[in-house]
């Protein structure tokens, strides 16, 4: 049963209700290892389903373009205060619709079209919005890309500095979507200072680890910090931009009226709820456990001969190069999904294969940690992954079916926030 329950959805639109129920069961029965996903709390789910979705609130608290903001203003101010308190920042904007629009707002705030922007290249773990060619950010600005080193799998800070001195980007991004190692915010800050660039830290993936004290914070180093709210931070789909007081006005103007119209007030409320949850003591325990689980899973995969980019992990994320296993990322990911282990195929640094059919797999441990799994379970998960990857190389479906049943049985002892199976 969905929690909160959805009885009217079931009676009035059984088609959608049926698909929601099927999706909930799918989330219940699978080991969810997609690094950008999580399970939000029932309180966050409830906030997203409120009448706040009915209200238009263009502008900011006290300066709106529509009447009737008596309750929306305090909700947005609470979300802002909680973000400021949790991350220790001077300014927070909680209105961006998602991570990509938040990043676009940073360009809007600091750059003119054609200005140079520097970011980690996409196949090396960067994000589309850090200036990749198919993104508006790569077409409307002049992208300069840094890489990771082939031998270490880590960002080469000497290369970043040399490139920044040569190309003089106005904006430098640090952070990304497939970085298994700690981001060196002070080193990026020094390069940005030396070259006169604005430093933006995109902490979409690691915001929950930072809030929980399990990854160093960019505060005091980056000029601007963007984050999604729905990955390790475990809130609704949305985003925030945080900064020093100096950049507050430019950022607020870029989000509205620069890029967006009315904020999604139901999302704002759910962000406030999630930020309150992230300030509780047990959230730090969750963040530590996410990293402990990733380390344990990485160790178990290494023991089975898996080639991990950078040789392991410092955070929630593991990037596997499957080349030595004789199978590509996509068929392996598809077989794993059929076996109840959900993750995504991913390019690895210097990948000789194409982006839609790359050599790697990306794994994250946030969702399984929320579900309550701890280190003791990781060798078993690594064993299942190994069995299915080998089966995928041989196209053996019997293994896949057996593992799916074993996965379902194991997960039945871990309750899922937001849904419980009928007794
Ligand atoms: C997920 C992600 C984004 C984009 O977020 P969306 O909400 O999917 O638009 C931006 N930057 C990084 C580093 C991300 O991981």
Image: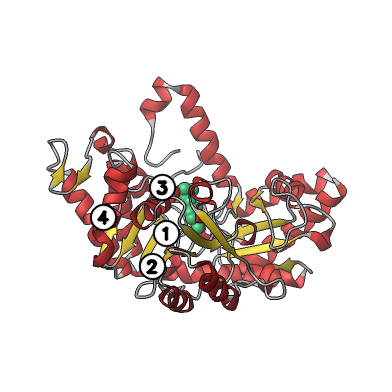
Kindly identify which residue carries mark 3.
Answer: 101
Kindly identify which residue carries mark 4.
Answer: 79
Q: Which mark is residue 211?
A: 2
Secondary structure beneath dot 2 equals: helix
Q: CA distance from mark 4 to mark 1?
A: 14 Å
Q: CA distance from mark 1 to mark 2?
A: 8 Å
Quadrant holding the N terminus = top left
In the foreground, 215 or 108: 108
Q: Is residue 189 left or right of residue 55?
A: right
* Percent position of residue 127, x then y: 54, 55
Q: Which residue is rendered at x = 32% and y = 52% of the image?
A: 271
Kindly identify which residue carries mark 1.
Answer: 233
Q: CA distance from mark 4 to mark 3?
A: 19 Å
Secondary structure beneath dot 4 equals: helix
Q: Nearer the viewer, mark 1 or mark 3?
A: 3
Q: How is the image coloured?
A: secondary structure
- Residue 220 visible? The answer is yes
- Tag 2: Cα neighbours inside 10 Å, few (<14), some, or many (≥20)? many
């Amino acid at each position: 049963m969905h929690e909160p329950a959805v009885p009217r959805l079931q009676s009035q639109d059984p088609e959608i209700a049926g698909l929601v129920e099927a999706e909930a069961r799918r989330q219940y029965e699978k080991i969810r290892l997609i690094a950008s996903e999580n399970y939000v709390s029932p309180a966050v789910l409830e906030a997203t389903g409120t009448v706040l979705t009915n209200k238009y609130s263009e502008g900011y608290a006290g300066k709106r373009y529509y009447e009737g903001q008596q309750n929306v203003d305090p909700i947005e101010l609470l979300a802002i205060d909680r973000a400021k308190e949790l991350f220790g920042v001077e300014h927070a904007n909680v209105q961006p619709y998602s991570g990509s629009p938040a990043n676009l707002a940073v360009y809007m705030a600091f750059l003119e079209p054609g200005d140079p922007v520097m970011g980690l290249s996409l196949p090396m773990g960067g994000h589309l919005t850090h200036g990749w060619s198919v993104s508006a950010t790569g077409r409307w600005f002049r992208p300069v890309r840094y890489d990771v080193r082939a031998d270490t799998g880590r960002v080469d800070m000497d290369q970043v500095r040399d490139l920044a001195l040569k190309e003089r980007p106005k904006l430098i991004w640090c952070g990304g979507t497939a970085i298994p190692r700690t981001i060196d915010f002070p080193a990026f800050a020094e390069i940005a200072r030396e070259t006169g660039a604005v430093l933006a830290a995109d902490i979409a993936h690691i915001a929950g680890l930072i809030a929980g004290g399990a990854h160093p914070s960019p505060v005091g180093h980056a000029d601007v910090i963007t984050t999604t709210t729905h990955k390790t931070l475990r809130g609704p789909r949305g985003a925030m931009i945080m900064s020093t007081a100096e950049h507050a006005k430019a950022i607020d103007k870029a989000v509205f009226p620069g890029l967006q119209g009315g904020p999604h007030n139901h999302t704002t409320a759910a962000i406030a709820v999630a930020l309150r949850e992230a300030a509780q003591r047990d959230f730090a325990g969750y963040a530590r456990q996410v990293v402990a689980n990733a380390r344990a899973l990485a160790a178990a995969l290494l023991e089975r001969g898996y080639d991990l980019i950078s040789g392991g992990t410092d955070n929630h994320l593991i990037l596997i190069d499957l080349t030595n296993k004789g199978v590509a990322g996509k068929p392996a990911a598809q077989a794993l999904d059929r076996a109840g282990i959900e993750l995504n195929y991913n390019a690895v640094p210097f990948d000789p294969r194409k982006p839609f059919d790359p050599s790697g797999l990306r794994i994250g441990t946030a969702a399984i940690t929320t579900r309550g799994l701890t280190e003791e379970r990781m060798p078993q998960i690594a064993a299942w992954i190994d069995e299915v990857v080998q089966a995928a190389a041989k196209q053996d479906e019997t293994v896949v079916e057996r593992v799916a049943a074993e996965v379902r049985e194991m997960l039945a002892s871990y309750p899922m926030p937001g849904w419980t199976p009928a007794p």
